[in-house]
Image (cartoon, rainbow, N blue to C red):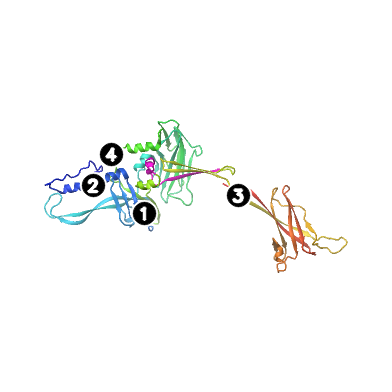
Amino acid sequence: MNSTNYPLERNHYFYGKLLTVRDFETEQTYYNNKTRLLNRLILGSGVVTGLRVIAVDDKSISIESGVALDDFGREIIIPSNVTLKLSMIDGFSNNDYAKNVYLCLAYDERGKEPIYAASGNSGRGGEVSEFNRIMESYRLFIREERPDPNAFVFERLFTQTEIIYQDELMTVTHTTPRYVNPGDWIHAEITIEKTVQAQRIQFTLSPEIENGEIDPATPEITFEEPQTKQKTKYALRYRLRAGSESNQKCNVSIGQNNCTITIGDKQLLINTTVQSSVQIIDEDVQDRLLRDYYDRPLDQSLFGSSTSAIYLAKLDLMQVGSTYMIEKVEQVPFGEYVHSNAMLAKLGGGAKNFSNLQSSTFRTESVVENLSAEEDPYFKATYNPTASTFEYHVGIPTVDVAKTKVRSGVIEFNKHQDDKESSFTFFKSSKSYVSDEITHGLGDGNVLITLAVEEPSQNTKILQGQIQVFKGSEFDSSHDVEALGSILYPEKGTFCIGVKLNSNRGVGAIRIRWYAQQAHELKAD
């Protein structure tokens, strides 16, 4: 196939012209190549609509109907949902189940309606079978190798990705933007992609920076995979500040001297040192990206591969005994989407936001700062076009949370001899009885004192609140208490209890249960 689709040639018709197969083929090729040329240059390649991949069971997937464009501008249409066993898809091998595989979609053609022709296209005689129609179709297949991260046109235009480490269990990459203004922050990303059954990962990085500096808040990037809820892909983002002079490069070096990767209890050997270079420029970064895009020569703009395909999904497989199961499906893992201009307009896009096309989705980063209770909260949002990332900075004042401490005790009012000359002792209704000072044990400060009448018996009763409501019932108190009260001494950490009865009673003792509560202020994390 002619991957360039040019120069374009069309038929010239005139009276008496003898039309051959070549002329009719030229007619079709002209319009196909013209349409595909515009598809490639204006729309790009990727998923246009639909084509979601769903795991219907442990070993089968379903691909929903949809449309895509490949690197050559050819339309790929899946007209209806397709359900397939993974083992039946071309390219799937059974040698190792604990792995990640990629479901790919490619353009395909196949003959339809075979008929007999008097002679073949080579001009030989005799009856030859030919197809009456060519049906534009598609091909689904599996790739087990992760593609080169710079193989996607918008990724290599706007970012630079280097592979730090790669083996059959894991790939670690480092991504930086192409351009930055002097003194601005550079947002870099470490991506760790592993298989489901790979052991727990630990990662540390202290990047060497030339013509720039690492964010002092995070001089070392560390990652320790959690014990539970592990994933197969992690993104570790950090930032560094570019130098103040333009027309220079901010270089980030990563190698065995400043990076360690441990999987399980084994430290991996990093054999090479990778270097990412971010160009420091004075002009607006978006303007520079646009200029790079439009300055590409035609051959570079139409660059494609005969083996190119669209990566519809990443399938994370888990080995179960002698077989496998589909653990997770990640849709369009490398962001290959065709963006509708109408959709971008609705989202507020345009020529200035062209660099948004580098990614199928916008990413977000958030930084939360704990403020003191006296400081005002704040919210700031910025957009990093080179990484298609919205950055949210939020300041949240600490909240005072009350934690209550409680102490409890019992005080007894014993019989009082109202008349020393009388042999009868009793409590009088006309008199209030006040205890000595009681230390509640919560220190100085305000506390809340709660009082209750306690009547010990076979089943102890503690009457709280307005106990007069029980008068005359089987729950009535034998003490006939009219009122309870307390006096607090905050500076001394003590209190007194007062009690008054409704009537004269000759009882042995009145037991009062007390509760002291104090709230201590704590700063919330």
Sequence-first tag of 1 and 4: 1
Sequence-first tag of 3 and 4: 4
Q: Quick one: SS at disc 3? A: strand
Q: Quick one: SS at disc 4? A: helix
- What label does residue 31 carry, if any? 2
| Spatial CA span between label 2 and label 4 | 20 Å
Task: From the image, state whether disc 2 or disc 4 is nearer to you.
Answer: 2
- What label does residue 53 carry, if any? 1
Q: Dots 2 and 3: beta carbons under 8 Å?
A: no
- The answer to whether one can see residue 339 in this image is no
Q: Is residue 362 magenta?
A: yes
Q: Residue furthest right?
A: 421
Sequence-first tag of 2 and 3: 2
| Spatial CA span between label 3 and label 4 | 65 Å
Q: Quick one: SS at disc 1? A: strand
| Spatial CA span between label 1 and label 2 | 32 Å
What's the residue type where badge 1 is placed? Val
Residue under pointer 4: 299
What's the residue type where badge 4 is placed? Asp
Residue 305 coordinates in the image, percent (x, y): 29, 44
Q: Which residues are magenta?
A: 349-370
> Quadrant where the N terminus lies?
top left
Task: From the image, state whether disc 2 or disc 3 is nearer to you.
Answer: 2
Towards the viewer: 11 or 168: 11
Residue 27 coordinates in the image, percent (x, y): 20, 47
Residue under pointer 3: 401
On the image, which quarter does residue 388 sit in? top left
What's the residue type where badge 3 is placed? Val
Residue 429 coordinates in the image, percent (x, y): 79, 62
Q: Give the residue displayed 79% in from the left and 60% down from the top.
A: 414
Towards the viewer: 171 or 357: 357
